[in-house]
Amino acid sequence: MSLTPQQHTWAKRFRWISLIEGISTLVLFFIAMPLKYMWDYPLAVTYVGSIHGALFIIYIITVFPTARKLKWTFSRTFFALVAAVIPFGPFIFDRNLKKSQHVDL
């Protein structure tokens, strides 16, 4: 599928948001939560959790206009939403998006 310049911009923007949100999930799960539960440092989850929450909301809000601009099917849009709540989901969705729409960062 060939993208227009505007669609390419939307796809790149979504990919960046998706990757940043995915990284924040991994930081929360594999750094902040162990700090809280193993070393009794709850502030890590407070700060990282707040950042991750904001990024999650931005991701969810960005899915819908991106889906409309890139003419995603219902199933692709649904997969994008589900990917946000599964660890490593944004990375899997990003790989799928890159393959199907040929969008590089």
Image (cartoon, grey):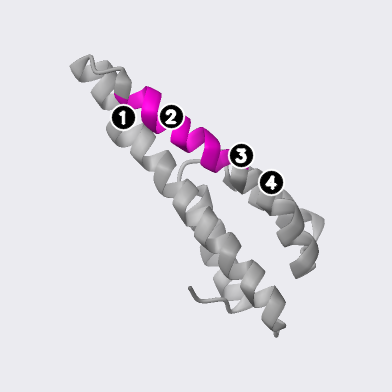
Using the rendered image of the protein, determine whether residue 12 is visible from the camera's viewpoint.
Answer: yes
Residue type indicated by callout 3: Ile
Q: Which mark is residue 57?
A: 3
Specify which label sits upstream in the sequence, 1 or 4: 1
Q: Which residue is mark 1?
A: 32
Is disc 3 surrounded by few (<14), some (14 to 19) or many (20+) residues within 10 Å?
Answer: few
Do tag 3 and tag 2 residues touch (Cβ < 8 Å)?
no
Residue type indicated by callout 1: Ala
Q: Which residue is mark 4?
A: 61
Mark-to-mark CA distance, 2 and 4: 18 Å
Do tag 1 and tag 2 residues touch (Cβ < 8 Å)?
yes
Q: Which of the two residues, 1 or 42, is positioned nearer the viewer here? A: 42
Tag 4 secondary structure: helix
Do tag 4 and tag 3 residues touch (Cβ < 8 Å)?
yes
Q: Which residue is mark 2?
A: 49
Q: Which residues are magenta?
A: 44-57
Specify which label sits upstream in the sequence, 2 or 4: 2
Q: Which of the two residues, 72 or 4, is positioned nearer the viewer here? A: 4
Q: Nearer the viewer, mark 3 or mark 1?
A: 3
Is disc 4 surrounded by few (<14), some (14 to 19) or many (20+) residues within 10 Å?
Answer: few
Specify which label sits upstream in the sequence, 3 or 1: 1
Whether residue 27 is in magenta: the answer is: no
Q: Which of the two residues, 10 or 1, is positioned nearer the viewer here? A: 10
Q: Which of the two residues, 20 or 1, is positioned nearer the viewer here? A: 20
Residue type indicated by callout 2: Gly
